[in-house]
């Protein structure tokens, strides 16, 4: 299990990121609502979607997992901050599901970064 855990975690995070892209790229009303609340519609919605796609791809390439995980942490930190400051924990009656997914994906990204920390150029060998 120890051998496969990092791979499974990478795939899970990549799937979560890719799954949310259809909402961003098709201008789903919920996605438009969220990004409108924080003043980032439509440029932020599309830009963050592209960044999530890049992060998902990087997570699936063994040499770039650290970079993908770093992007995931940054993206989800922004989402968590937006939930706490602008849009609220519960969005359109979802019971906090979106916020919970942001927290969970952030944690998984942090775990991945920790597991692949030695791959980080220049500083990785010192960690």
Image (cartoon, rainbow, N blue to C red):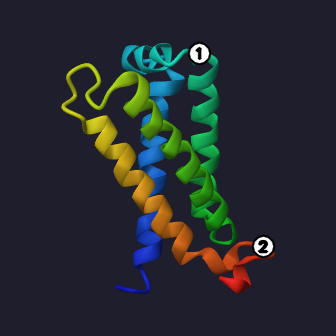
- Dot 1 lies on which element? loop
Residue appearing at x 63%, y 71% in the figure: 62
Dot 2: within a 10 Å radius of its alpha carbon, few (fewer than 14), some, or many (20 or more) residues? few
Which mark is drawn over residue 98? none
The answer to whether 51 is drawn above or below residue 35 in the figure is below
Residue appearing at x 42%, y 66% in the figure: 9
Residues at marks 1 and 2, CA–CA distance in whole angstroms: 34 Å
The C terminus - image quarter: bottom right
- Taking the image as shown, residue 100 lies to the left or right of residue 72, namely left
The N terminus - image quarter: bottom left
Percent from the top left, x then y, of residue 78?
52, 38
- Dot 2 lies on which element? loop
Percent from the top left, x then y, of residue 5?
40, 77
Q: Residue 46 is drawn in which quadrant?
A: top right
Numbered marks: total: 2
Q: Nearer the viewer, residue 77 or 2?
A: 77
* Pointer 1 residue: 42
* Pointer 2 residue: 121
Percent from the top left, x then y, of residue 3?
44, 86
- Taking the image as shown, residue 11 lies to the left or right of residue 117, namely left
Q: Earlier in the sequence, mark 1 or mark 2?
A: 1
- Taking the image as shown, residue 92 lies to the left or right of residue 59, namely left
Percent from the top left, x then y, of residue 123?
75, 76
Dot 1: within a 10 Å radius of its alpha carbon, few (fewer than 14), some, or many (20 or more) residues? some
Mark 1 or 2: the one toward you: 2
């Amino acid at each position: 299990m120890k051998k496969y855990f990092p791979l499974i975690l990478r795939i899970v995070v990549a799937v979560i990121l890719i799954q949310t892209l259809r909402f961003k790229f098709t201008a789903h009303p919920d996605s438009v609502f969220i990004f409108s609340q924080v003043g980032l519609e439509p440029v932020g919605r599309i830009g963050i979607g592209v960044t999530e796609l890049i992060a998902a791809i990087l997570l699936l390439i063994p040499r770039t997992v650290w970079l993908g995980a770093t992007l995931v942490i940054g993206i989800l930190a922004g989402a968590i901050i937006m939930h706490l400051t602008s849009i609220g924990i519960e969005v359109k009656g979802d019971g906090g599901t979106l916020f919970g997914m942001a927290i969970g994906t952030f944690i998984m990204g942090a775990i991945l970064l920790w597991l692949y920390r030695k791959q980080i150029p220049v500083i990785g060998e010192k960690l």
